[in-house]
Image (spheres, rainbow, N blue to C red):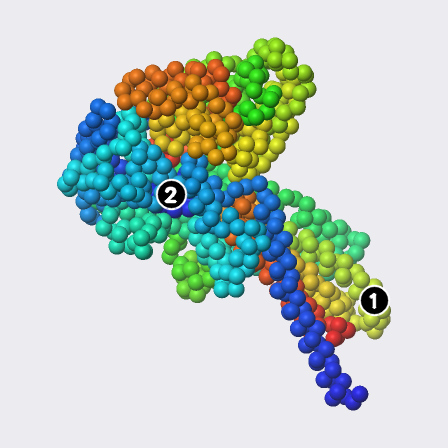
């Protein structure tokens, strides 16, 4: 096979690999939705009675059940939901009485904002700490980093959240109170994306921007500490493997400075597997953090999801599951693509 | 004001059935009659200046005040009142039964509820009942008067403005809704046309689901009022001179239901034994100080006709003797369903211990509130620790729920508390219905007193506690009036120095 033909074969192989991954997305999401639907219907909660109340006569209960399609067989209910989904209709939430799409547009952006901020904090601190721990393996910097990582992953998030609120807000006054933005700015920032830090910047309202950023800091720090633990530990582990490699030994033998060996030789090889870790960590943050959202009154997807599940509000549950599932699948796909981009061995 | 706001579905009085939206509606709308703020059991005219009731309860004539104005500036007329009540009947949403129970239907409501002129509203009642009963129902949130012209101008198809009123208020109350962000905040601004305008120009309610966060916000001064503090948090504030606490008895009860489908729980001696086994005072003193008080009647003390009898106390020896007489062997198992939200989880554990002391082995079955309600509605419980809030401020609300079960079959017409536990006592059922039909108010209250005593003596329910709503006010804040029902809570008198 000549060079051009080999090149063509490589490209088509790459494309078919990517195409195969993309083609599996709908199948994955379908399976996820089906399982969620079945589990949701197994819950011992009747959503109809939450709407009509205790005194509704039987005919009102029956009429409401029929209007919601809950009198149909399960397979028909699921098929109907899928059919509406094809038209971009996620149905109406039984609890909020709003279209689920409206609810998700309301609650997902704050989660995206919080998750992104938490991840950036975790990356900014977790990666250098992981590299430091590996470079000083067995010595006190390594021990300190491992304690920090253990702390981040062991302390319950809601305990950390309350402690931070007590310390940084109530005692020191360094952070503002709960919510996405202060009362003074309620309704003043046009909601274009739902991420108020971004919306305030787009509106050029820098006072509101500073306030929104200040409100974001503490919950992002709480979630960031938890994620930092994961990233620091994984970075340390990958770095230890890389630092034990022959090419690192060779680089050191050639007299290349330690810092250069760490960051220019070892770390690029660690970055590739780290992509998957970061992608999964980000996906985990994006599904919402119920307890953090509760303590900080953050109007995110986690709280919406959990309340909907406990109310057997299946339209909302399926809609939120679709979003979370798409996020997981999408981030995994991006991680795979990044792998292929950065690791020539995978190509 | 910091409180939970994630239960809001609709602000339409014809549809609103949750605590938060009812409370907000209570400050944005007025009704024909309203409870006296100093004594909720007394009714006074709100939009109505005066009224006459036929002796047999078949007709009410209301004469409206001339100076009541909607937030739009339009005067409130009898036509608005008639329209408001008619749409509740027509829409027939969750709270619709409060008005419909007197026989009004979509077919007859225009004929039977009518404006004779701008200031006179006539209600012909197909199913006459005591005047107090009808008036208390008209004082419920479902009886709120909406601005007919504005609502119809925003109606879509034949929805009678339901879509518009879900997110807007068109009332004559001291406030109007100006901003709502789901699970975030609600902003109310003063209605400039209200007679006796509100003291505060704006009230902002912030959704703060965590009580600890509410406590910290109050301490820092970032909120002026915290509404959902726990008993121990309130205890901590009570001794602090910077803060003040306001409280009001609620028409909300906590009780243990005994499912009569379970053979063990049918025996009168077993029913009595459970009532003697519970440490009522211990629960109230140690688990729920300030927030729940002992109440052994199905009528909380704030409701008209409530009695304060307390026939039962913690007497494990007596309870044990009753169980022995019933032939119940020590260690007999029984389950107790309960919601994991506070204070039910702690109370359930105390009840488990109390019943263990008399020889019953209780297995606790925790669940989310909605799951427990669904399970009891499906009648799958044995014992269940449940809560009940009166739907309207009349003894009939609770009497009907606890005492009436005309048909215990699966298709029974009344599927409330008595039905769910297969409780059917024809004599008590009949007495409750008769009290609901009694048109002489004094006789009616006497009937309810008798009914409560008979219920306490024989019914398979351990009535435990009634709720006290407590709000913590920050420095310089005063005037919040908590109501026995959410829509009786008033913001208009709040001041801040």
Residue A177 image position (x, y, % from top left):
48, 46
Which image quadrant: the N terminus of chain B? top left
Q: Which residue is drawn at 60% across and 56% down?
A: A33
User: B425 and B9: which one is in front?
Assistant: B425
Q: Residue at x 68, y 48 (%)?
A: A153
Question: How far apart in space, not on screen, are marks 1 and 2 (Cα)?
Answer: 71 Å
Q: Is residue B411 left or right of residue B159?
A: right
Q: Residues within 10 Å of mark 1 (few under 14, many from 20)?
A: few
B364, above or below B496, in the image: above
Residue A265 showing in the rendered view: yes
According to the image, label 1 marks what residue? A245
Quadrant assignment, res B12: top left
User: B245 and B38: which one is in front?
Assistant: B38
User: B419 and B48: which one is in front?
Assistant: B419
Residues at discs 1 and 2 in contact (Cβ within 8 Å): no
B149, above or below A206, in the image: above
B318, above or below B486, in the image: above
Quadrant assignment, res A131: bottom right
Q: In this view, does A181 lie to the left or right of A166?
A: left
Q: Nearer the viewer, mark 1 or mark 2?
A: 2
Count the marks.
2
Disc 2 is attached to a residue of which chain? B
Q: Which residue is drawn at 55% across and 18% down?
A: B271
Secondary structure under tag 1 reads loop
Secondary structure under tag 2 reads loop
Residue A316 showing in the rendered view: no
According to the image, label 2 marks what residue? B93
The answer to whether dots 1 and 2 both sit on one chain is: no
Q: Which residue is drawn at 29% across and 17% down?
A: B442
Residue A23 image position (x, y, % from top left):
65, 69
């Amino acid at each position: 096979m000549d060079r051009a033909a080999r090149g063509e074969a490589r490209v088509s192989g790459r494309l078919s690999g990517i195409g195969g991954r993309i083609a599996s997305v709908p199948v994955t999401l379908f399976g996820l939705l089906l399982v969620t639907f079945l589990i949701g219907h197994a819950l011992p909660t009747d959503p109809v009675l939450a709407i009509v109340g205790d005194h509704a006569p039987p005919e009102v209960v029956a009429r409401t059940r029929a209007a919601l399609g809950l009198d149909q067989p399960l397979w028909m209910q699921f098929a109907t939901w899928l059919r509406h989904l094809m038209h971009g209709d996620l149905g109406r939430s039984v609890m909020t009485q709003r279209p689920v799409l409206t609810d998700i547009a309301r609650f997902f952006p704050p989660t995206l904002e919080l998750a992104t901020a938490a991840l950036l904090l975790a990356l900014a601190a977790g990666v250098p700490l992981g590299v430091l721990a590996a470079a000083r393996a067995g010595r006190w910097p390594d021990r300190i980093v491992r304690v920090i990582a253990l702390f981040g992953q062991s302390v319950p998030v809601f305990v950390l959240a309350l402690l931070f609120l007590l310390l940084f807000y109530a005692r020191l006054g360094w952070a503002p109170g709960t919510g996405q933005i202060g009362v003074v700015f309620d309704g003043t920032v046009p909601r274009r994306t739902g991420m108020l830090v971004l919306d305030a910047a787009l509106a050029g309202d820098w006072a509101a921007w500073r306030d929104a950023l200040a409100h974001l800091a503490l919950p992002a720090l709480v979630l960031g500490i938890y994620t930092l633990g994961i990233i620091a530990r994984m970075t340390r582990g990958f770095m230890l493997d890389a630092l034990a490699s022959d090419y690192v030994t060779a680089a050191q033998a050639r007299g290349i400075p330690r810092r250069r060996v760490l960051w220019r030789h070892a770390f690029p090889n660690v970055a590739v597997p780290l992509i998957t870790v970061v992608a999964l960590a980000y996906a985990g943050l994006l599904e919402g953090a119920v307890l953090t959202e509760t303590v900080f009154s953050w109007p995110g997807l986690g709280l919406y999801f959990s309340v909907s599940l406990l109310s057997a509000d299946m339209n909302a549950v399926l809609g939120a599951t679709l979003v979370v599932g798409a996020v997981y699948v999408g981030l995994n796909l991006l991680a795979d693509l990044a792998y292929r981009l950065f690791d020539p061995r995978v190509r | 004001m910091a409180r939970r706001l994630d239960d809001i579905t609709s602000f339409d009085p014809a549809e609103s059935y949750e605590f938060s939206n009812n409370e907000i509606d209570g400050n944005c709308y007025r009704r024909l009659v309203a409870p006296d703020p100093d004594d909720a059991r007394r009714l006074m005219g709100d939009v109505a200046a005066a009224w006459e009731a036929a002796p047999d309860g078949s007709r009410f004539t209301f004469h409206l005040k001339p100076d009541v104005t909607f937030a739009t500036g339009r005067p409130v007329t009898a036509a608005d009142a008639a329209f408001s009540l008619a749409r509740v009947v027509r829409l027939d949403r969750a709270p619709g039964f409060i008005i419909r129970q007197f026989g009004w239907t979509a077919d007859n409501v225009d004929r039977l509820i009518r404006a004779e002129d701008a200031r006179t509203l006539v209600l012909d009642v197909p199913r006459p009942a005591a005047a107090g009963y009808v008036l208390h129902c008209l004082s419920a949130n479902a009886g709120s008067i909406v601005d007919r012209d504005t609502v119809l101008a925003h109606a879509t198809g034949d929805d009678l403005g339901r879509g518009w009123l879900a997110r807007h208020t068109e009332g004559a109350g001291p406030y109007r809704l100006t901003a709502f962000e789901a699970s975030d905040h609600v902003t109310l601004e003063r209605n400039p046309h209200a007679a006796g305008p509100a003291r505060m120009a704006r009230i902002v309610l912030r959704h703060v689901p965590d009580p600890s966060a509410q406590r910290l916000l109050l301490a820092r001064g970032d909120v002026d009022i915290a509404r959902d503090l726990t008993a121990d948090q309130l205890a901590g504030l009570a001794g602090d001179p910077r803060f003040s606490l306001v409280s009001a008895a609620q028409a909300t009860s906590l009780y243990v239901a005994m499912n009569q489908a379970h053979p063990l729980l049918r025996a009168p001696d077993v029913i009595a034994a459970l009532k003697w086994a519970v440490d009522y005072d211990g629960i109230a003193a140690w688990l729920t100080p300030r927030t729940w008080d002992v109440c052994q009647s199905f009528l909380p003390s704030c409701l008209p006709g409530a009695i304060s009898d307390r026939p039962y106390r913690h007497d494990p020896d007596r309870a044990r003797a009753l169980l022995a007489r019933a032939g119940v062997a020590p260690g007999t198992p029984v389950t107790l369903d309960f919601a994991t939200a506070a204070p039910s989880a702690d109370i359930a554990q105390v009840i488990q211990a109390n019943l263990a002391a008399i020889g019953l082995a209780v297995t606790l079955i925790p669940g989310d509130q909605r799951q427990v309600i669904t399970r009891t509605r499906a009648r799958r419980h044995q014992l269940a620790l449940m809560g009940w809030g009166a739907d309207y401020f009349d003894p009939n609300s609770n009497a009907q729920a606890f005492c009436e079960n005309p048909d215990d079959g699966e298709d029974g017409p009344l599927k409330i508390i008595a039905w769910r536990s297969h409780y059917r006592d024809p004599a008590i059922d009949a007495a409750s219905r008769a009290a609901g039909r009694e048109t002489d108010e004094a006789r009616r209250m006497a009937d309810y007193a008798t009914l409560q005593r008979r219920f306490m003596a024989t019914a398979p329910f351990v009535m435990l506690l009634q709720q006290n709503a407590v709000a913590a006010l920050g420095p310089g804040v005063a005037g919040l009036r908590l109501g026995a029902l959410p829509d009786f809570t008033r913001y208009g008198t709040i001041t801040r120095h």
